[in-house]
Amino acid sequence: MIRSLLFFVLLLTQVGCHGTPLRQQHSGIELIVLGIAQDGGVPHLGCQKDCCVEARQSRLRLGPACLALVDHRSRKIVLLEATPAIEEQLSLLRQLVGFGNERTSPIDTLLLTHAHIGHYTGLIHFGREVASTDGVTVHCSERMASFLRENGPWSQLVDLGQIQLSPVSPGQPIEVLKGVIATPLSVSHRDEFSDTMAWRIEGPERTLVFCPDIDGWNDGILESLIEGADLCYLDATFYDGRELPGRDLSEIPHPPMVVTMDRLSEEAAIDPGRIRFIHLNHTNPALRDASVRKEIKRRGFSVAEVGERFRLD
Ligand SMILES: [Zn+2]
Ligand SMILES: [Zn+2]
């Protein structure tokens, strides 16, 4: 019962009380977190464990990892990932920023990491049947762009000009808002349909890194990803492998949170809250287990929360 209550409270804090989070006024450029779960979200289709049974009973949902960059002056919106929960996530964004209802296009620019379902299939709502957007710029890798261009239903978005593909190469900086530079970084991740990129976003004053999916922290990739970044949103699909009983930790194709915390213990101690975990699987105890959350906090790390916001200027 206590566990169930905690889960309920945690989920409420994710969306704000009864889905009506307090609106704050900002004048500059902001990062806002709109989703923190793995591709399947919470509750997860077919899961009959406590994690998802309780979420269903509470009618609460956590959408897949998604960030928004908002320029309050120009009222432009850049989205990192188009998730299956895109409508819900953009509704929350409108509530948080206090504008957007007047917009004809839901967003201005989209940055994508890769072609797994939690990261791009929200694009399905950009087509004729729903928003029928007009030339939304989509930055992604060349291989991801080819995938969208050559496979339905995504190809129709391209053919009708509803999205404008603008492929970028790893290391190539692009200005996505006035004074905000986004640079993709190549990362290893199972690549059935596309390769995978992380994104580095440099605002006028603060820099963030978004790496929701990666196989592991090999070849110094972790250190180069976080170097000089003020906020680092990193893959936290699994906590310590207890979510996958019987599986060898070293064979799980994601870096467990405990490994990331061991690797970055000094950085977290110096600057608590700088390393923020995102892309949590529905089974991850960091979503609901009070002792696990306490341990994460004690070590100077944070689990990202839906609705959290940081100024980049
Ligand atoms: Zn994913
Ligand atoms: Zn993936």
Image (cartoon, rainbow, N blue to C red):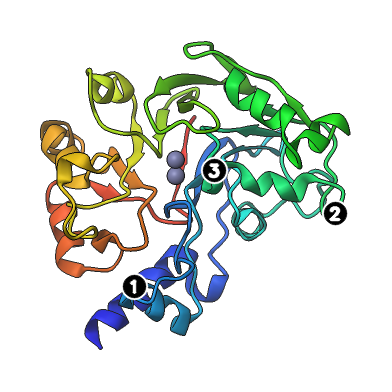
| Label 2 close to label 1 by CB (< 8 Å) | no
Residue at the disc numbered 3: 119
What is the spatial separation of the Cα atoms under label 3 and label 2, in whole angstroms? 20 Å
Corner quadrant of residue 284:
bottom left
Asked if the beta carbon under badge 1 is closer than 8 A to the nearest atom of ligand 1, the reply is no
Number of residues whose C-alpha sits closer than 10 Å to that of mark 2, classed few (under 14), some (14–19) or many (20 or more): few
Q: Using the image, tell me which numbered label, if any, was put on residue 51.
A: 1
Determine which of the numbered discs, if any, sits on residue 187 in the image. Answer: none
Q: Residue at x 71, y 39 (%)?
A: 75
At 87% from the left and 48% from the top, the residue drawn is 128
Q: Closer to the N terminus: mark 3 or mark 2?
A: 3
- Image quarter for ligand 2: top left
- Residue 100: give x, y in percent of width and height: 74, 50
> Helix, strand or loop at disc 3?
helix
The reply to whether dot 1 and dot 3 touch (C-beta < 8 Å) is: no
Mark 3 vs ligand 1: CB under 8 Å? yes
Residue 139 seen in the current view: no
Q: Is residue 158 left or right of residue 199?
A: right
Q: Is residue 305 left or right of residue 128?
A: left
Gap between marks 2 and 1 measured at Cα: 34 Å
| Residue type, label 1 | Cys
